[in-house]
Amino acid sequence: MKARDDGSEVNAPARTAISARQLTRKFGAKTAVDHIDLDIPSGRIYGFLGPNGSGKSTTLRMLCGMLLPSEGHAEVFGLSVVDDAEAIRRRLGYMPQKFSLWEDLTTDENLRFIADLYGLDGDVAGRIAQQRQTYDLEQLRNQRAGTMSGGQKQRLALAAATLHSPELLLLDEPTSAVDPQSRRDFWERLFQLAERGATILVSTHYMDEAERCHGLAILAEGRLVAEGSPRDLMNAVDADVYEIEGADGSEAPRLIRELPWVHGVTQLGIRLRVLADRRQGGAGDALRALLASHGIGARIEPTHASLEDVFVVATGREKRNGR
């Protein structure tokens, strides 16, 4: 069965695309990736969500053989990222965060050059024509990449990364410089690739993109702090969530943030969204009492956790643990 894009359970593919155990990368005294374990099934879109410096890009570079692990090991389709890096590279496509194709070459020239790099033979011209059609590049075939918009460059980069029909696609924050419509179109293409059997590992800091992944790992300061489907993560978040109306423009945000069992307070228009430690019994009553004691009359209601709430709780816990 095809995987659904809402994170719900379906029949999982039997094969594991990526397996990592205690994967670690150090740069001098700094540990960029700290003993992470991963098992990613084939044919899925799996996301890395985390702030800058959390280890997302470093992990991707180790998985594609661009960096050697300092400790631990990882396998891609059963091949060692250390011993079989060249064989792995022939089976994957990599799209870095920064546009890395040649800006003084046209669309077709870039794609032909990539075809040569991969040693593609047969009907290469036909393959390039198919990529132009798939990624809406027909009108850009003779345009130099350096004159393209962010969305056009993104489509060209994805066409180049998938020209050799890779089984695994690694994307490092691929939508960071494009408009919302281009992001939406880009993700539609990713689902089409996954439906044809490709495994896609994508790093992002956009919550809406992370929520579209079949599986998700949240990284903070090099460590894996939460993992699962977006729906499972939201259902299992270790916090109670409340929305408060009628307290905007008051000192309520400051008062609530000072409570030791509050993970975070977010202003959403005229509402406040509060994350309270689940071990704090009666958090709603405590919030009402606090605001009432300062003459603030407000309506407080429990609500469901969002993926952003999961992110705040998971990464906040890592900071509280002194990392």
Image (cartoon, helix red, strand yellow):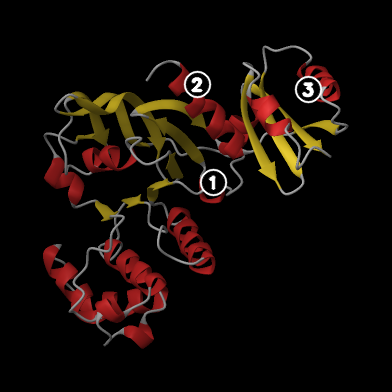
- Which residue is disc 2 drawn over? 317
Pointer 2 local density, CA inside 10 Å: few below 14, some 14–19, many at least 20: some
Measuring from the top left, give residue 293's x and y in whole percent: 84, 20
Report helix, strand or loop for mark 1.
Answer: helix
Q: Could you say which is closer to the camera, residue 58 or residue 21?
A: 58
Amino acid type of disc 2? Arg
- Which residue is disc 3 drawn over? 287
Q: Is residue 240 above or below residue 14?
A: above
Report helix, strand or loop for mark 2.
Answer: helix
Q: Could you say which is closer to the camera, residue 213 or residue 34?
A: 34
Amino acid type of disc 1? Met
- Which residue is disc 1 drawn over? 207
The Cα atoms of the two marked residues, 3 and 1, are separated by 27 Å
Instruction: Find residue 141 and report its image quarter.
Output: bottom left
Residue at (35, 25) in percent of width and height: 37
Q: Quadrant of the C terminus?
A: top left
Q: Is residue 187 above or below residue 181?
A: above
Q: Disc 3 or 2, which lies upstream in sequence?
A: 3
> Does residue 285 show up?
yes
